[in-house]
Image: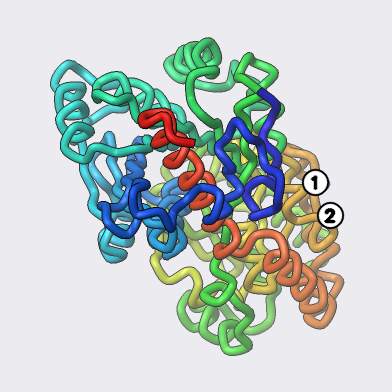
């Protein structure tokens, strides 16, 4: 089987025949036929998304956006979510969209006998036509779940993580990746949100013929330029009017390399740029950051009135357009960072390290530096500071134009829906022999 083209999910003619017209041509997949699953005289076809957990993160956020979008309903698809771990904060958003959530209530990512029994019971009750795994443990669970249900639903994997070096991954994750590489011919498709990640996983043995590359999507109405956001941001966080505000919105995790951004900001300030660093996200609060001696030492290089540390917030879209610069200093692991797309949609220029597809996503609308290069990161921050407000505004408008053209949530949700519709139709044809 040849690799799936991105165009195959845009509604273009001539998609991969083996994928069951995954481009989503309603006439060809036959959704107007009442005899087909999802037709007018039958119940909707169910897609069960299986994910490790529902705490705040890029994969979890994209899942919430996807299942809350009407694209699947327009194609006669019903969506439900199964969290292996106890559902976290993102579950509230999913429930608010009317999407049922199931959970195994696990305390850790690897299941025991009881968890497997609960998994089998949930899958048999939901009776999905499609099992969509998310992230490594969710993909593994989807494959196991398919073997626990009569009729064997179609299994799709969704990889949300780049893999520049498998040796930096925890030992348990390395074992799962090697197992999945050996069994990667079994899922109907392996979705990647990053071109770089797709190549990296193929290099460790993932079946390249199963690739489907679908970028992250963004609501460019909810995330949009707002002249009032600048004053709002400074009021919310108590930031004065003079400095250029550099924001990092992310969870505090080693791969995010927050210490590098702190050091780069201090270095840019020494070069004469009045920067104010704003850190927002899970673990970005003062107590957590100061608990790390290395991070505390880095923060000591910044004046107290030129840094703001905040925990996780649910109102990011409200103040994100008020930032002058968004920075992402990650050293590894990123595939397609959501915050980069959200900032671009808001018209905020970005500085990012070249990890995963982050550099490609930003393109010429921001600055890209090598991972781990603090001096280059400081220089990039200085470049954007020197542009002035009008220069950053022009760069931000170019970023928004790119976000709308390439990464709108409407088009991305349609591509997922088209893939699911094609898979459901193929499953129906296989089961009935109809063509």
Q: Is residue 168 above or below residue 242?
A: above
Q: Residue at the location (54% across, 57% down)? A: 414
Q: Residue at the location (65% across, 24% down)? A: 209
Which percent across, then down, holds residue 276? 64, 68
Q: Residues within 10 Å of mark 2 (few under 14, many from 20)?
A: some
Q: Is residue 418 above or below residue 2?
A: below
Left or right of 149? Residue 181 is right
Q: Are marks 1 and 2 in contact (CB under 8 Å)?
A: yes
Q: Element under label 1?
A: strand
Most foreground residue, 109 or 149: 149
Q: Mark on residue 345?
A: none
Which percent across, then down, holds residue 133? 41, 34
To which residue does mark 2 refer?
379
Which percent across, then down, holds residue 171? 46, 14
Left or right of 101? Residue 421 is right
Most foreground residue, 222 or 210: 210
Question: Disc 1 or 2, which lies upstream in sequence?
Answer: 1
Q: Element under label 2?
A: helix
Q: Is residue 164 among what the camera can see?
A: yes
Q: Is residue 299 among what the camera can see?
A: no
Most foreground residue, 405 or 319: 405
Q: Mark on residue 369?
A: 1
Q: Residue at the location (56% across, 63% down)? A: 409
Q: Residue at the location (56% across, 65% down)? A: 410
Residue located farthest toward the front when viewing the structure as drawn: 434
């Amino acid at each position: 089987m040849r690799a799936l083209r991105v165009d195959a999910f845009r509604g273009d003619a001539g998609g991969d025949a083996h994928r069951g017209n995954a481009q989503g041509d309603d006439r060809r997949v036959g959704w107007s036929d009442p005899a087909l699953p999802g037709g007018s005289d039958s119940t909707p076809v169910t897609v069960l998304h299986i994910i490790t957990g529902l705490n705040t993160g890029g994969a979890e956020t994209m899942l919430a956006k996807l299942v809350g979008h009407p694209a699947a309903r327009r194609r006669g698809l019903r969506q439900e979510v199964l969290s292996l771990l106890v559902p976290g904060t993102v579950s509230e958003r999913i429930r608010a969209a009317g999407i049922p959530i199931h959970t195994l209530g696990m305390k850790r990512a690897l299941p025991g006998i009881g968890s497997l029994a609960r998994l089998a019971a949930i899958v048999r009750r939901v009776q999905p036509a499609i099992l969509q795994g998310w992230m490594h443990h969710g993909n593994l669970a989807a494959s196991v779940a398919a073997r626990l249900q009569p009729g064997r639903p179609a299994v799709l994997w969704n990889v949300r993580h780049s893999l520049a070096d498998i040796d930096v991954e925890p030992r348990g994750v390395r074992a799962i990746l090697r197992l999945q590489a050996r069994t990667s011919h079994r899922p109907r498709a392996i979705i990647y949100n990053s071109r770089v990640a797709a190549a990296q996983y193929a290099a460790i043995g993932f079946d390249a013929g199963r690739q489907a590359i679908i970028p992250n999507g963004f609501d460019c109405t909810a995330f949009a330029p707002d002249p009032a956001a600048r004053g709002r941001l400074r009021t919310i966080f108590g930031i004065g009017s003079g400095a250029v505000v550099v924001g990092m919105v992310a969870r505090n995790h080693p791969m995010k390399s927050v210490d590098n951004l702190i050091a780069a900001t201090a270095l840019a300030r020494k070069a004469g740029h009045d920067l104010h660093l704003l850190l927002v996200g899970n673990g970005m609060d003062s107590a957590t950051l100061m608990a790390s001696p290395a991070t505390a030492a880095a923060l000591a290089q910044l004046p107290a009135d030129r840094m703001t540390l905040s925990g996780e917030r649910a109102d990011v879209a409200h103040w994100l357009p008020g930032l002058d610069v968004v920075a992402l200093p990650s050293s590894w692991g990123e595939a397609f960072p959501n915050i980069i797309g959200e900032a671009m949609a808001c018209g905020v220029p970005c500085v990012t390290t070249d990890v995963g597809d982050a550099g490609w996503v930003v393109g010429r609308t921001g600055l890209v530096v090598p991972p781990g290069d603090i001096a280059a990161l400081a220089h990039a921050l200085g470049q954007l500071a020197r542009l002035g407000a009008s220069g950053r505004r022009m760069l931000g408008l170019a970023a928004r134009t790119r976000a709308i053209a390439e990464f709108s949530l409407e088009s991305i949700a349609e591509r997922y829906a088209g893939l699911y519709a094609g898979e459901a139709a193929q499953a129906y044809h296989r089961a009935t022999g109809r063509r």
